[in-house]
Image (spheres, helix red, strand yellow):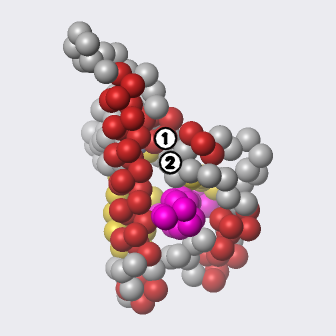
Amino acid sequence: MHAYTQKDIRASFVNASLRERNALVVPDLGEVDWQNLDYFGWRDPKQPLAGFIVVPVDDEPVGILLRQAEQRTRTRPQCSWCEDVTLPNDVVLFGAKRAGKAGRNGDTVGTLLCENFECSVNARRPMPPAYLGFDVMAARQRRIEALRAHADGFARDIRDSH
Ligand SMILES: [Zn+2]
């Protein structure tokens, strides 16, 4: 994805109330490796159950406020975006309010995601060849494309549902 400014990000949230928007703390973006990210996400220690992601949809940032389900699942689930079965990080269930009226009426969408939004790193992790002649780079590219498609589909679903 290409780089967005703090201002772009702050203005991009489609499912946050005014109060939530005012509480939004966009992190320092100086060290962000945008070109190796398929979506940008962060957590806020002051709001431990909140999650924040910005997904490029047709190159426009779509910010989505997530809320982590308090209950953890017994067995570690698979992230539904990077679909990695050997993840080095935890995966949690997040819910996102749909934009506009639907969200105000309590309509939410749930998704399992890497706890601190490590999906882009995971999709780019080198993996052992599955068999002789296995094309590792092509497989990596497929995983990146699948991650982008999941993030794009989710962001459109949240944004366009009202
Ligand atoms: Zn993931």
Q: Residue at image x 53%, y 76%? A: 14
Stretch in magenta: 46-67
Q: Residue at image x 36%, y 53%? A: 149
Q: Are marks 2 and 1 in contact (CB under 8 Å)?
A: yes
Residue 124 x %, y % = 46, 31
Work out whether residue 64 or residue 156 is closer to the camera in this orientation and state it: 156
In which image quadrant can residue 23 be found? bottom right
Image quadrant where one finds the C terminus: bottom left
Question: Is 8 situated left or right of 146 in this image?
Answer: right
Q: Which of marks 2 and 1 is nearer the N terminus?
A: 2
Label 1 C-beta lies within 8 Å of the nearest ligand 1 atom: no
Q: Identity of the amino acid at label 1?
A: Ser
The local secondary structure at tag 2 comes to: loop
Q: Identity of the amino acid at label 2?
A: Asp
Vertical arrangement, residue 133 with respect to residue 32, above or below? above
Work out whether residue 15 or residue 127 is closer to the camera in this orientation and state it: 127
Residue 60 x %, y % = 56, 66
The answer to whether residue 113 shows anywhere in this view is no
In which image quadrant can residue 48 be found? bottom right
Magenta: main secondary structure equals strand
According to the picture, the residue beneath numbered tag 2 turns out to be 38
According to the picture, the residue beneath numbered tag 1 turns out to be 120
> Which of the four quarters of the rendered structure image does ligand 1 lie in?
top left
Work out whether residue 85 or residue 146 is closer to the camera in this orientation and state it: 146
The local secondary structure at tag 1 comes to: helix
Work out whether residue 33 or residue 21 is closer to the camera in this orientation and state it: 33
Q: Residue at image x 22%, y 13%? A: 131
The answer to whether residue 162 shows anywhere in this view is yes
